[in-house]
Amino acid sequence: MIYLEPCEETLKRYEDNSIDLIITSPPYNIGKMHSNRLQFGSYANNDMKEPDYQKWQIEVLNECYRVLSENGSMFYNHKVRIKDGKAIHPMEWLLKTNFVIKQEITWDMGKSANCDKIRFFPFSERIYWLTKNPKVKLLNKNSLSDVWRLVPTHQRKDQNHIAVMPDGIVQNILDAIPNKPNVVYDPFGGSGTTMKVCKQNGIDCIISEIDKEKENTILEKVGEKEKKKIYRQELYLETKCSIAYNYSLRPTN
């Protein structure tokens, strides 16, 4: 299911404890420009005052907590950002949510988009494993460490998205959870990586994406571009949401 709407609206549709796994990477609130590089701005909420951004993230995370099942997990990708010469760590707001922070994973990207020589080049981001229940365990069958070396290979212009999550991150997560989830939710769907990898693993996925221009990018990635024309109106009658459609539960024509 794809909802082209704010994730806050999508989350209202789901009951407490109804989703087993959440995987996401929100907009980082990194503003408009770094020197003469590409402008970031497809999200209206990507240039907020920092206290407002953190408040918003806490609200979204706590709604994710509400819908997450008792033994479910959330994996939240973010990074240490530099604003006004100071480092801002995601722990600043994660510690204010209802979640148990089980582990911090370092995503070693092997390269950096920020090559200003006023500090060491940032080659890494963070992935936080969050749960409701502190007793939840993984089944780390691939014996992964807490450092994941996954180098992004996409071209920005190709996927209409500034920071595409590698398929390998989602696959690492799916390989590590002990039971196949009933459904996976990505509140910031981006270019559709979470949905693509879930589909490859036979797992139903729900995503929210506020940028309607990414619709075709998502559909191309999950291989369902033609189904949009067939099922959009049908699902509108079922859900009263004209910009949602189901990609996984319909027969292929």
Image (spheres, grey):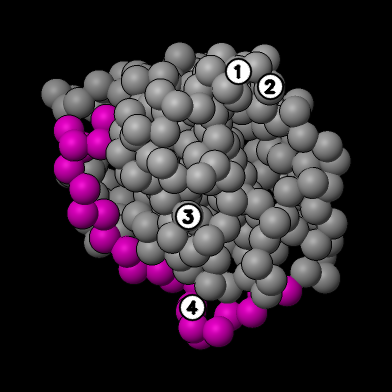
Instruction: Check disc 3: other Cα within 10 Å, few if <14, some if 14-19, many if 20+.
Output: some
Please state which amino acid type lies under the numbered disc 1: Tyr
- Snapshot quadrant of residue 111: bottom left
Please state which amino acid type lies under the numbered disc 4: Ser
Quickly name the residue at label 2: 239
Please state which amino acid type lies under the numbered disc 2: Thr
The answer to whether mark 1 and mark 2 are in CB contact below 8 A is yes
Q: Which circle's residue, 3 or 1, is located before the other in the chain?
A: 3
Instruction: State whether residue 19 appears in this view.
Output: yes
Q: Identify the residue at the far front of this view.
A: 253
Is 126 in the magenta? no
Is 138 in the magenta? yes
- Whole-angstrom CA distance, mark 3 to mark 1, is 23 Å
Residue 145's label in the rendered image is 4
- Whole-angstrom CA distance, mark 3 to mark 4, is 26 Å
Residue 85 percent across, percent down from the top left: 38, 33
Quickly name the residue at label 1: 236
- Whole-angstrom CA distance, mark 3 to mark 2, is 22 Å
Please state which amino acid type lies under the numbered disc 3: Lys
Secondary element under disc 3, as helix, strand or loop, is: helix
Q: Is residue 35 above or below residue 71?
A: above
- Whole-angstrom CA distance, mark 1 to mark 2, is 5 Å
Q: Which circle's residue, 2 or 4, is located before the other in the chain?
A: 4
Secondary element under disc 1, as helix, strand or loop, is: helix
For residue 129, side relative to residue 213 (left or right): right
Q: Is residue 67 above or below residue 199?
A: above
Residue span colored magenta: 137-164
